[in-house]
Image (cartoon, rainbow, N blue to C red):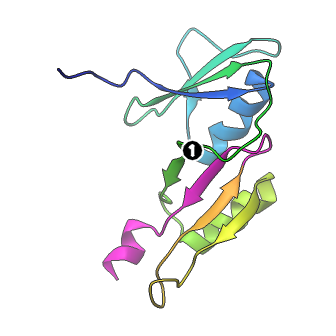
Amino acid sequence: MTALVSHTTIDCANAYELSEWWKPVLGYVDLDGDPNLPGHEECLIRDPETGHQLLFIEVPDTKSVKNRVHLDLRPRSRTRDEEVEVLLAHGATVVGDHRDEHGPGTGWVTLVDPEGNEFCMLRSEAERAG
C-alpha cells in the first residue's frame, strides 16, 4: 500500500493569523484564487516552487504537550544562525539550542511559533557542504 501526502496540517487557535505568520518564514503563498482572510477557520498555503501545502485549521483545544510531529527547516539562502535571528525578530522563541552538540558547526535550534508549535532550524545545504 502507498499513499501521497496531500498537505501537512497544523492545529491552531487562529488559522488566518498563524498562516500569515508562517508565509514569510517559508516563502509560501495563498492558493491562486483562494486567498486566506481574517475569520477563515481553515487557511491553506503552498510553496510556489515545490507545491507543498500547509493547512492551518482552528481547533477548540489548546496545545498542552510537546508536538509529536514537527517541521525541520533549512534556510534557502542564509545560514542557520542568520535565519534564527530573523525568526526571533519575527516572533519565534528558542526553546532548545543544540548547536555544536555533535562538534563545531553542527546541530540545530528548536523554536516555537506564536502558538507554541515546535520547529527546528537546521544548517543550510551550503553550511553542510562546507
Residue located at (74% from left, 64% from top): 94
Number of callouts in the render? 1
Q: Position of residue 107 (x, y in %)?
A: 50, 75
Q: Answer with left or right where residue 33 lies relative to residue 65.
A: left
Within the image, what quadrant is residue 87 found in?
bottom right
Q: Position of residue 5 (x, y in %)?
A: 36, 25
Q: Check the image and report above or below for 109 versus 76.
A: below
State the extent of the magenta-drawn residues as a range. 113-130
Q: Amino acid at mark 1?
A: Leu
Q: Answer with left or right where residue 103 lies relative to residue 2.
A: right
Q: Residue furthest bottom?
A: 104
Q: Quadrant of the C terminus?
A: bottom left
Does the stretch in magenta take in 114?
A: yes
Q: Quadrant of the N terminus?
A: top left
Q: Position of residue 78 (x, y in %)?
A: 54, 67
Does the stretch in magenta take in 124?
A: yes
Residue located at (69% from left, 43% from top): 117
Q: Answer with left or right where residue 92 lies relative to residue 66.
A: right
Within the image, what quadrant is residue 129 found in?
bottom left
Residue nearest the viewer, comparing 94 with 126 = 94
Q: Check the image and report above or below for 97 versus 122.
A: below
Residue nearest the viewer, comparing 69 with 75 = 69
Residue under numbered circle 1:
26
Residue located at (81% from left, 52% from top): 91
Q: Position of residue 125 (x, y in %)?
A: 37, 67
Residue located at (76% from left, 36% from top): 63
Q: Secondary structure at mark 1?
A: helix
Residue nearest the viewer, comparing 31 with 10 = 10
